[in-house]
Amino acid sequence: MRILGINALFHDPAAALVIDGHTVAAAEEERFSRRKHGKRPLPFSAWELPEKAAAWCLAEAGLRPQDLDAVAYSFDPELARPTEEMGLDDPWDHLRLMYARQAPGFLATALPGLDPDIVRFVPHHMAHAASSALAAPGAETSSVLVLDGRGEATSHLAGRRVGDRIEPLYGQQLPHSLGLVYEDLTEHLGFLRSSDEYKVMALASYGTPRMLGELRRHVHPTGDGGFRATGVPWSELCAPLRPGEAWTQAHADLAASAQACLEETLLDLARWLHGQTHDSVLTMAGGVALNCVANSRIAREGPFDRVWVQPASGDAGTALGGALYLAASGGDRTEPLAGADLGRRWSDAELEAWLKTAAVPFERPADVAETVAEALAGDQIVAWFQGRSEYGPRALGHRSLLAHPGRSGNLERLNDVKGREQFRPVAPMVLADRAGEIFDGPMPSPYMLFVHDVAEEWRERIPAVVHVDGTARIQTVDPVGEPLVARMLGAFEERTGLPVVVNTSLNTAGRPMVDDPRDALECFGSSPVDLLAIGPFVVRRGAFFAGGQPDAAGSEETLPSRGEGFAAAGVVPGGAAPA
């Protein structure tokens, strides 16, 4: 079966294509539209669809809309109830539900030729569950735990996968929601809700959980697989912050208390689920599953032998989950994910055409991995653009900013480059066979979804990637799956003795991660990055701004004047530049 998955209703609109149980392509709309998270999660934006992402997924497989067997829409309006009945304050939610009911017609308009009758509504949390349970390797019999802000009428699903079937065991009814409580805290601390929750997790490391007792009165497990989570009096605990205001120790302590309360509740839910299933493997999805500190505690203290978290655990992942759910329901055997690199890619010839069209001076070294390792060893910051872009919020060695981990000042330097708060950590990528001697935590960790304690003897050797609490959110690199990244890490270790490189997302604050060559060149040109490694080519900052330098073919090129550039040259964002 050829199935297109669509996530659209709340936030992070995305599309995914599954053919005969195999995941062919997946991407968030923000990578095409350049709007962070695609849109804000408001009822008035619920009609917006991931049109560009969906069209690209089909083009990647050479399909037309009429070639599809089914479209999975990851929300079922028939399961929803009026918000006043659920205890939610959202008077315009009926508008969201109206748009959801009209989704088949909207999709047929967005994808001409699509038969609206093949659109199927998949329950939101079942789509989350399928994105993890049906995509995890070695999880044919496993438990699955989903937690987020909200679905149709619940905020949580606990279940079990047996073969290609998922059996729900419990769902927490709204208004109780761990995700919504964390969103409320995010807004209380002056950050953008449904966007900046990861900042609260980072800030928590600077505090102590002295308000935990009070929070437990409002957020706690109920012992039957569910929980209570609503009505936290945030302002009584700590004064709110306006956006941009400086945080105080009280704000950090509140974040730490909420983080500890979340972890306690999640641990109880995991233990209850294990008591029902006695499985050895737990898979997780939903926005709360992006809380890598909580994930690590579940892996460390929970009853499961292995915990696997879907790399696009937020709502974007429901596009994949919906498609996998329909594939399994239709009799296809679903295949586990081989990696998160499911987005757009360009051939070497296409990248060269982009660079020539942009009149950018570039080189083609004998080995880009060696050239980048040399630059990193010399304490340069490198923009790394290689292969297919990642599905999900983590940069995993395809759209990354790289730096030397042994220079403590590189944390501040990178946060300045990206224009973000200085309390935010950056992450290390490390060769998989060396990770165990440096980091203690769940291994392997290819998707940066757990935190690891950094060995005492290594903390002074790689200070840029060690958070204030002595941990790091690592990415382990397997040479089989990521040969180029592994070769770069090996070359860097030869020069420095460190098998670790700083890896953070290739973007600046408030903007989506770089996805296509135009994005890479714009980011490189507007931020103090020393080297751009794009495919087998490199662009050096000095040459980039000098202009008139010979390109790889030896011809003189000049930078385009203001008002010219890609659009004037006829470059198409989703494909190659004209030759």
Image (cartoon, rainbow, N blue to C red):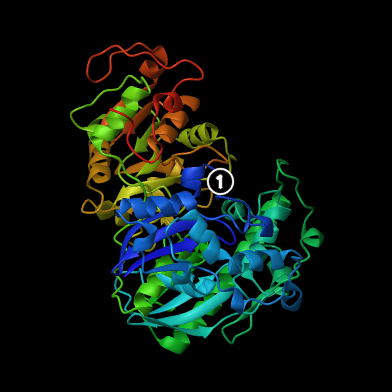
Q: Which of 256 and 561 is in front in this view?
A: 561
**x 52%, y 52%: residue:** 469
| Among the 4 quarters of the image, the one containing residue 75 | bottom right
* Visible residue check, residue 536: yes
**x 78%, y 61%: residue:** 237
Q: Which of 358 and 48 is in front in this view?
A: 48
* Visible residue check, residue 438: no
**x 31%, y 40%: residue:** 386
* Image spot of residue 402 (x, y percent): 38, 37
User: Can you say which quadrant of the picture contains the C terminus?
Assistant: top left
**x 59%, y 66%: residue:** 102
Q: Nearer the viewer, residue 246 or 152?
A: 152
Q: In this view, does 80 lie to the left or right of 35?
A: right
* Image spot of residue 572 (x, y percent): 39, 35
Q: What element carries label 1?
A: loop
**How many circles with numbers are drawn on the protein?**
1
Q: Name the residue under label 1.
A: 36
User: Can you say which quadrant of the picture contains the N terminus?
Assistant: bottom left
Specify the farthest residue to the right.
Answer: 236
Decide: is 408 above or below 154.
Answer: above
| Among the 4 quarters of the image, the one containing residue 380 | top left
* Image spot of residue 100 (x, y percent): 59, 66
Q: How crowded is mark 1: few (under 14 residues within 10 Å), some or many (20 or more)?
A: some
Specify the farthest residue to the left.
Answer: 366
* Image spot of residue 94 (x, y percent): 71, 68
**Amino acid type, callout 1:** Lys
